[in-house]
Amino acid sequence: MLEVHLLASGSDGNCTVIESDGEAIMIDAGISCRRIMSLMEVAGIDKESVKAILITHEHADHISGAGATARKLDVPIMTNISTFEASNLGNVKYVPVDPTSSFEVAGMKVTPLPTSHDAVDPCCYFTETDNGRVLLATDTGKLNFQIEHALSLADIAILESNYDPDMLTNGPYPAMLKKRIRGEMGHLSNFDCANAVKRNLREGTQLFLAHLSKTNNMPDIARQTVSDVTGIDRRKVDCMEFQCDVRTLRA
């Protein structure tokens, strides 16, 4: 069985564990090591199963607990050299990743895909196992053809749906931050996400909306927008309720 455990998703921190046939990888660790250990126990994840921590980019909500967690689990950090050098994770094992090539870890084929975000060399990851394929794509202002192609292949698609345009426009953020979020190096809106899903998602794929803004979005608005644009029953559009629980998806 393929299991995807979303331990945290949002601007307060991001951490996901993908598990297949008793081995697992962690993608990002943007909450404390103590919290990660606690949530792994809640999700029923054997800490010995985690073989590596993959990092998408160096922003704090994706790496704040990565160094401590890598040392606690005694596993390597895997990411491209530019991201690793920008992350300042301390004394950790490090396995460099070529951002243009797939690699094998924990019995999985993992393909880094470039994202459009204001970081040094950001990416997302497409993971393939004998039990299914997972796309985890957040923190990008637009979707390139590589991500859209992966979206069309995924059995589980975890896709950013960061903000509602009206809430962002009328919200408390300063103008420069609003411009950054809307820009091609920022984040995907609910409508951006919905249109990508409409173009690419195949029937039967599990869709999970990720990285929702606490200030500029609401789960019900995100779900309804995707449902309205795509025609997918909103009850089949899942998302995190602002880190209130651990979510597990299975293929």
Image (tube, rainbow, N blue to C red):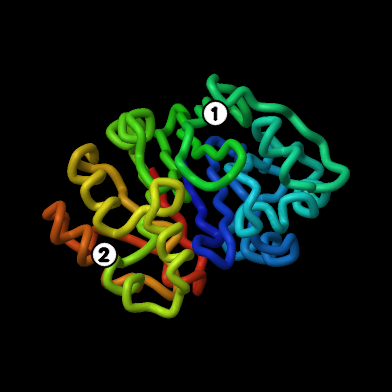
Relative image position of residue 24 (x, y in whole percent): 60, 40
177 left or right of 28? left
Per the image, the residue denoted by label 2 is 223
Extreme residue toward the right, this view: 91
Q: 2 or 223: nearer the eye?
A: 223
Number of on-image labels: 2
Mark 2 or mark 1: whose residue is earlier in sequence: 1
Label 2 crowding class (10 Å Cα cut-off): few <14, some 14-19, many 20+? many
- Res 51 visible: no
174 left or right of 52? left
- Does dot 1 land on a helix, a strand or a loop? strand
Relative image position of residue 59 (x, y in whole percent): 63, 53
Which residue type carries mark 2?
Arg
Residue occupying image coordinates x 41% and y 52% = 249
Which residue type carries mark 1?
Met
Q: Which mark is residue 2?
A: none
Residue 191 lies in quadrant: bottom left
In what quadrant of the picture does the N terminus appear?
top left
- Res 167 visible: yes
Label 1 crowding class (10 Å Cα cut-off): few <14, some 14-19, many 20+? many
Residue occupying image coordinates x 47% and y 73% = 174
Residue occupying image coordinates x 47% and y 31% = 113
Residue 30 lies in quadrant: bottom right
In the rendered image of this protein, does residue 1 appear above or below residue 149?
below
Q: 183 or 151: nearer the eye?
A: 183
Extreme residue toward the top, this view: 101
In the rendered image of this protein, does residue 21 appear above or below residue 194?
above
In what quadrant of the picture does the C terminus appear?
top left
Residue 190 lies in quadrant: bottom left
Q: Which mark is residue 108?
A: 1
* Residues at circles 2 and 1 in contact by the CB criterion of under 8 Å: no
Residue occupying image coordinates x 58% and y 22% = 103
